[in-house]
Image: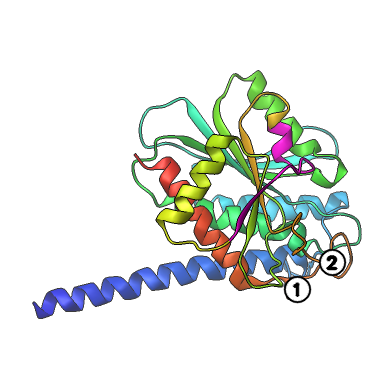
Amino acid sequence: MLNRIILTSLLSVFCISVTQAFQDDQVTLLKKLTGASPIMNGVSLSERYEQKSKEQAAAYLKQQMDEFCDEVTISSYSKTGSNVVGIIKATQKTDQWVVLGAHFDSVRNCPGANDNATGVSLIYAVGQHIARLQNLRYNIYIVMFDEEERGLIGSQAFAKRIKKEGVNLIAAHTIDQMGWDQDGDKGIELEMPTDALRDFYLNVAKKYGFDFPIHRTNVTSTDHNSFRRIGFNAIGITEEYKNGDTTPYYHKSTDTFETVNLPYLKSTTDFMKKVFEEMLIK
């Protein structure tokens, strides 16, 4: 009996340590993308708009994703744009796919912390979590899109590519701006979900006790719309953009790491981990 108690305690400590390590990784990535710490020796990013800074960010993201994805490529679709595409393969035979994506570029002269290093750090953490799961029934694309700020160019290129390749995509889930929660209610918005996707998210929240507002909106101005336009099911997830609890530093030089509400980002990351567990585990 005593041995069992000791073993249980050790397992609990190990799980807490693993969880904390993943959270630390998420914050480290957020800092490096926003210039709060160097992304490589002697190099800190002040923005992710110019070509050189985007290439540095893409190389760093590929390096991080290589640690948990089965395959990672920097997929160039033009002279100015490249998506970072990771693949986590299903553990059973299937031709079905799910996309989890977020754009990594920023506007000019903007660190792009909330918009959209928060989204990138969220899908990175969820990707790490997915890679540890067993019995995955779908293949997963983890995609860091380029050139969202120039008109959803990166996500359009990726969506058109997989459409042309005949990929059997169940749905695309994209994250944009997930670091502001002034009123402290931890609320999120679901942008243009199908009824089935909306109900699925609501049911996951209820099942796991995520007691925060979940609003449905008609916002089409970010990457999820690239998939919907060509016939794929899609959903966008964001902070309370339409409901007025969104960053005042949008597209400004003041959109820095220090303005990100880390507990809020953790809350939504934890929620999205459960969303994907429920979706993927059979």
How far across and down, in percent of the image, does residue 234 sit?
Answer: 63, 36
Observer able to see residue 262: yes
Q: Looking at the rendering, which quadrant does residue 256 occupy?
A: bottom right
Residue 259 is tagged as 1
Asked if the residues shown at circle 2 and circle 1 are in contact, with their CB atoms under 8 angstroms apart, the answer is yes
Report the side of 258 relative to 280 (left or right).
right
* Mark 2 element type: loop
For disc 2, the marked residue is 249
Q: Residue furthest left?
A: 1
Q: Is residue 277 above or below residue 113?
A: above
Residue 116 placement (x, y as % from top left) = 74, 56
Q: Is residue 226 magenta?
A: yes
- Is 187 in front, or is 77? 187
Give the tally of numbered discs: 2
Rendering coords of residue 37 (x, y %): 72, 73
Q: Which residues are magenta?
A: 213-227
Residue 128 shows which numbered tag? none
Left or right relative to 53: residue 103: left
* Circle 1 residues within 10 Å: few <14, some 14–19, many ≥20: some
Quadrant (top left, top right, bottom left, bottom right) of the N terminus: bottom left
**Is residue 250 covered in magenta?**
no
On screen, residue 82 versus residue 64, left or right, reads right
Q: Earlier in the sequence, mark 2 or mark 1?
A: 2
* Residue 175 to residue 155: above or below: below
Which residue occupies 84% across, 47% down?
149
Task: Decide: is 276 above or below 260.
Answer: above
